Image (cartoon, grey):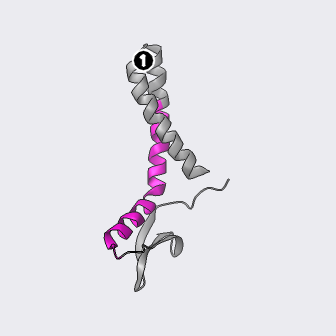
Amino acid sequence: MSEHTPGPWRVEARGGMAGREVRAVATYVVATVNTTSNDEGNREANARLIAAAPELLTALREMVKAVDELMTEFISKKRAADWGVINHAGVLAGLAIRKARD
């Protein structure tokens, strides 16, 4: 499995063309974002979300570490109700990380 292009990524207009490019380091294009409609806001929001991906993945990885630590603490103190909520968040974060990785 390959790693993604390191961030940070940024959004740029596509030189007079409709759409946006998500770029990393100098001129490397990570993604091109177009829409079939004239909804500039939607296109811009999608490009910003893609550009945030490296930071979001890092945040999720840190969250999973914190959840693992909290779960260990809650299990040792037999706080099952707290564990359930934290475990659910950890599972969702783990699924998102796997989707980004695989």
| Residue at image point 44% right, 53% down | 55
From the image, give the main secondary structure of the stretch colored magenta: helix
Part of the protein shown in magenta: 38-67
Residue 65 drawn in magenta: yes
Q: Could you tell me residue 56's position as x and y percent?
A: 44, 51
- Alpha-carbon neighbours of circle 1 within 10 Å: few (<14), some, or many (≥20)? few
- Using the rendered view, name the quadrant where residue 44 is placed: bottom left
Q: Is residue 96 positioned above or below 38 on the image?
A: above
Residue 93: percent from left, percent from top: 48, 41
The residue sitting at 42% across, 72% down in the picture is 35
Residue that extends furthest to the right in the rendered view of this protein: 1
Residue nearest the observer in this picture, 6 or 99:
99
Residue for point 42% across, 17% down: 80
Which picture quadrant has residue 39?
A: bottom left
Residue 100 in the image, given as x and y percentages of width and height:
55, 52
In the rendered image, residue 61, in percent from the top left (x then y), is placed at: 50, 42
Horizontal side of residue 100 vs 53, given as left or right: right
Residue depicted at x 40% and y 81%? 18
Which residue is disc 1 drawn over? Answer: 80
Image quadrant assignment for residue 4: bottom right
Q: Is residue 94 magenta?
A: no
Q: Amino acid at mark 1?
A: Ala
Q: Is residue 33 left or right of residue 44?
A: right
**Compared with residue 81, is residue 24 higher up or lower down, i.e. above or below?**
below
**Above-or-below relation of 68 to 75:** below
